[in-house]
């Protein structure tokens, strides 16, 4: 039996609900339109920024290195992540609707879990890449050859695909009997579990606990990698060498900090301070802001990427 068939079968057995009602951004028409234009601006910025990074890396042979290969994958995941939630939210604000189909909700859960978990795995791999580049530069070509990079990226995408299937199938196999209204602008697992009518939701909670342990393990690996990187950078004799080494690490450290801090606030905040408005703001911070801001962070201290992007822009402007 194929995985998609198992997923559909478990979902159909989980609930008789045919659609969910998402949280509206505002009650007045003016504020709804304001949210639409705000999200449209953020979405276009994310499309432009990540699309420019992907195209620049793909077209410039000087950027065909492990660091930029992983950055290209990160931009692809960012595009997928923000495209999972924002277009639907814009449509709801524009047409003053709240409904999302049961299948559409399941698709949102699957895609969001897939893209976010794959991004976290990729950020962990990128920390390893910077560790090898700075702490073991003589072994960089051996440990991070083109085949090894492809295998690591494929492992991240593949493992997170099955992880997302497991989460989605488990969540939508739980009977729901507390209505169909979700206190979020997209389908989020914790909000769906609030609608469960039995203790069967504990299976998903157990899976989330295991996930937190894995996330914490990756976080420790990233922290230890950067402790050794900073120690190695401080031992570089020349100031120019230290600046160059740090400039290649700073964007990744900033992206990791933004990603982890927003996720931690979203899922580890005390229930006593939880409210629909706060949950809405936090969800925007971890699902919308990082994909839009990451290209800007990576371009701040990266002259090679800036040069390639500017070359691409000028070529498009003056193309005859």
Image (cartoon, grey):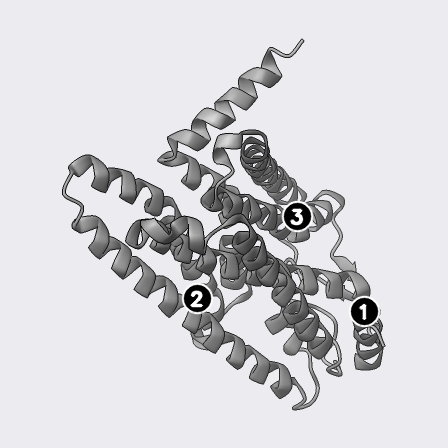
Can you identify the residue that label 2 sits on? 264
Residue 56 x/y as whole percent? 55, 31
Count numbered badges in the picture.
3
Name the image quarter holding the C terminus. top right
Residue 52 quadrant: top right
Q: Earlier in the sequence, mark 3 or mark 2?
A: 3
Residue 201 quadrant: bottom right
| Rendered view: 160 above or below 148 | below
Residue 232 appearing in the image: yes
Residue 184 appearing in the image: no
- Tell me the distance, in whole angstroms, between the alpha carbons under discs 3 and 2: 22 Å
Q: Residue at x 26, y 60 (%)?
A: 227
Q: Which of marks 2 and 1 is nearer the N terminus?
A: 1
| Rendered view: 175 above or below 82 | below
Q: Which residue is drawn at 56% across and 63% down?
A: 117
Q: Are marks 3 and 2 in contact (CB under 8 Å)?
A: no
Can you identify the residue that label 1 sits on? 4
In the current view of this chain or complex, which residue is farthest to the top?
A: 320
Can you identify the residue that label 3 sits on? 83
| Mark 3 vs mark 1: in front | 1
Local crowd at mark 3 within 10 Å, few (<14), some, or many (≥20)? many
Residue 49 x/y as whole percent? 54, 35
Secondary structure of residue under mark 2: helix
């Amino acid at each position: 039996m194929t995985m998609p068939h198992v997923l559909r079968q478990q979902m159909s057995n989980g609930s008789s609900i045919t659609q969910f009602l998402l949280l509206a951004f505002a009650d007045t028409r003016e504020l709804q339109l304001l949210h639409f234009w705000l999200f449209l601006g953020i979405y276009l910025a994310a499309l432009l920024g990540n699309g420019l990074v992907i195209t620049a890396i793909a077209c410039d042979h000087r950027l065909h290195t492990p660091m930029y290969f992983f950055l290209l994958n990160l931009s692809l995941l960012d595009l997928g992540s923000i495209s999972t939630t924002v277009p639907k939210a814009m449509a709801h604000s524009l047409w003053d609707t709240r409904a999302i189909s049961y299948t559409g909700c399941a698709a949102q859960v699957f895609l969001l879990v897939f893209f976010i978990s794959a991004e976290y795995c990729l950020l962990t791999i990128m920390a390893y890449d910077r560790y090898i580049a700075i702490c073991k530069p003589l072994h960089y070509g051996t440990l991070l050859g083109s085949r090894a990079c492809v295998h690591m990226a494929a492992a991240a995408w593949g493992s997170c695909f099955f992880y997302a299937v497991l989460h989605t199938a488990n969540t939508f196999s739980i009977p729901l009997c507390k209505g169909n209204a979700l206190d979020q602008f997209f389908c989020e697992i914790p909000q769906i579990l609030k609608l469960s009518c039995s203790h069967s939701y504990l299976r998903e909670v157990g899976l989330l606990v295991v996930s937190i342990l894995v996330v914490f393990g990756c976080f420790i690996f990233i922290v230890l990698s950067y402790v050794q990187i900073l120690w190695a950078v401080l031992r570089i004799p020349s100031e120019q060498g230290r600046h160059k080494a740090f400039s290649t690490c700073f964007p990744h450290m900033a992206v990791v900090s933004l990603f982890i801090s927003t996720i931690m606030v979203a899922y580890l905040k005390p229930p006593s301070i939880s409210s629909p408005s706060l949950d809405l703001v936090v969800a925007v911070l971890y699902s919308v802001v990082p994909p839009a801001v990451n290209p800007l962070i990576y371009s701040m201290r990266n002259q090679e990427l800036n040069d390639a992007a500017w070359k691409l822009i000028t070529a498009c402007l003056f193309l005859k």
